[in-house]
Amino acid sequence: MLRENCKPFQENLPAYSLGALDADELAALESHIATCEDCKAELAEYRTISYGLLQALPPQAPSARVRRYLTNRFASKRTGKLVPLFQRFSLGQLVNAFVMLMLIVSNVFAAMQIGDLRQEQTALAERLSTEQAAIGMLAFPNTQIHMIDPDVQDLTGSALVNIDRPMAVLLLWNLPDLDPSRIYQIWLIDPSGKPIGAGWFVPANGQKYTTALVQSSAPLGDFIAIGVTIEPLGGSDRPTGERLLLVEL
């Protein structure tokens, strides 16, 4: 493990291993490496990786345009260990290494985009399931529509409740924007006033209209109200944040 006084130099080790460190930083790093075995060992690992990558690539002659560009570019910026590096590897190998690096970056970016799409797909599937539950609730006999009592401005909505069943659906408009570290948590209030967790939800980005499923282990007739509060990500054992609404049953 590197010592505290090594941290200012650690970030320059990869560039130094490739001979691409600026002249003003080069002298300070070489002076430090001369007396630090930890950084010297770290540098050896970076050199093994970078040299191995370059040597694994077959030589390939670049186009005349690329050769002229690279020659002019490197001629103006040769400092420290940069000259030995380009003497050791052909321009074709360096170009191939650069292309490989760009492909790796592109693959990482594509993977991030796929992850975002999967999250959006999951959110849409959950919303569809909740809206289907709302349609099903309307088909049950004795289902009632309860208006919410909002605690924040502009929030409106209602709840589909059937006291004989262990679920309800909240239909909400104009929920306040949430901090990424917060969620909306649903509570069922029993006759003694005790809140019992009944699920949580996060509205889709940019959506003014939200449906949320209220889940219970007992029929809704055993409770006197439904409430929603803002809680930390992952939920709470009891309400700790701001209350948004209350639905009296």
Image: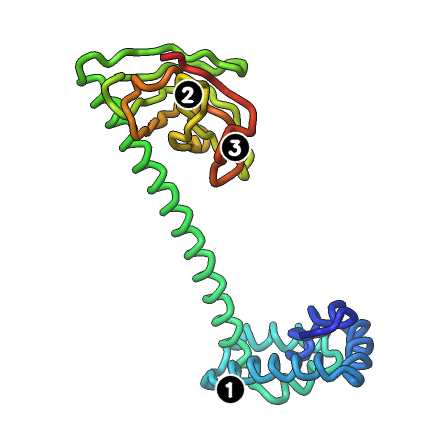
Q: Residues within 10 Å of mark 1 (few under 14, many from 20)?
A: some
**Given the image, on which type of amino acid does mark 1 rest?**
Gln
Q: Of callouts 2 and 1, which one flags the residue occurring earlier in the amino acid sequence?
A: 1
> What is the quadrant of the N terminus in the image?
bottom right
Q: In the picture provided, is 197 more to the left or to the right than 136?
A: right
Residue 231 is marked as 3
**Residue 147 location (% of width, % of height):** 38, 10
Q: Of callouts 3 and 1, which one flags the residue occurring earlier in the amino acid sequence?
A: 1
Residue on which disc 1 sits: 55
Task: Calculate the distance from the C-alpha at mark 2 to the C-alpha at mark 3.
Answer: 17 Å
**Given the image, on which type of amino acid does mark 3 rest?**
Glu
* Residue 49 higher or lower than 162, as above or below: below
**Residue 77 location (% of width, % of height):** 72, 74
Residue on which disc 2 sits: 189
> What is the quadrant of the C terminus in the image?
top left
* SS assignment at label 1: helix
The residue positioned 40% from the left and 12% from the top of the image is 248
